[in-house]
Image (cartoon, grey):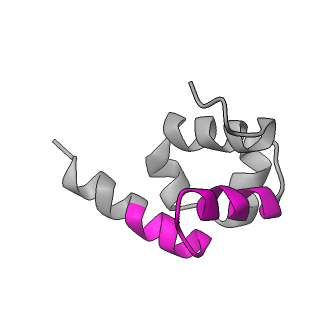
Amino acid sequence: SQPSLSPALLRISEYVLNDPAKVVNQTITEVADGSGSSEASVLRFCRDIKFSSFQRFKLALGIELSTHQT
């Protein structure tokens, strides 16, 4: 479904989509370890989806989650 992503970036994407609420509370190292990738790959993933940092990505993810809670 995301053919333009490298294998590492695809793993990160799947990891985030699988449990975004968990990712919001994780460090970049924890996301890298959990997705079987590197911190550099996690940062590249964030930049590829137009966030300048992992922290900005997590902030936006948290806001998105809070606006879609039932």
Q: Quadrant of residue 35?
A: top right
Q: Quadrant where the C terminus lies? A: top left
- Residue 57, x across and y down, in percent: 50, 65
Q: Is residue 29 left or right of residue 57?
A: right
Residue projecting furthest to the top: 1
Q: Is residue 53 above or below residue 57?
A: below
- Residue 13, x across and y down, in percent: 60, 41
- What residue sits 57% from the left and 75% below the top? 52
Q: Quadrant of residue 62?
A: bottom left
Which stretch appears magenta?
A: 39-60
The secondary structure making up most of the magenta span is: helix
- What residue sits 20% from the left and 55% below the top? 67
Q: Which of the two residues, 15 or 41, is positioned nearer the viewer here?
A: 41
Q: Quadrant where the N terminus lies? A: top right
Is residue 42 on the magenta stretch? yes
Residue projecting furthest to the front: 4
Q: Which of the two residues, 37 or 26, is positioned nearer the viewer here?
A: 37
Q: Quadrant of residue 11?
A: top right
Q: Which of the two residues, 28 or 2, is positioned nearer the viewer here?
A: 2
- What residue sits 79% from the left and 50% below the top? 33
- What residue sits 67% from the left and 44% below the top? 12
Is residue 62 on the magenta stretch? no
- Residue 22, x across and y down, in percent: 51, 50
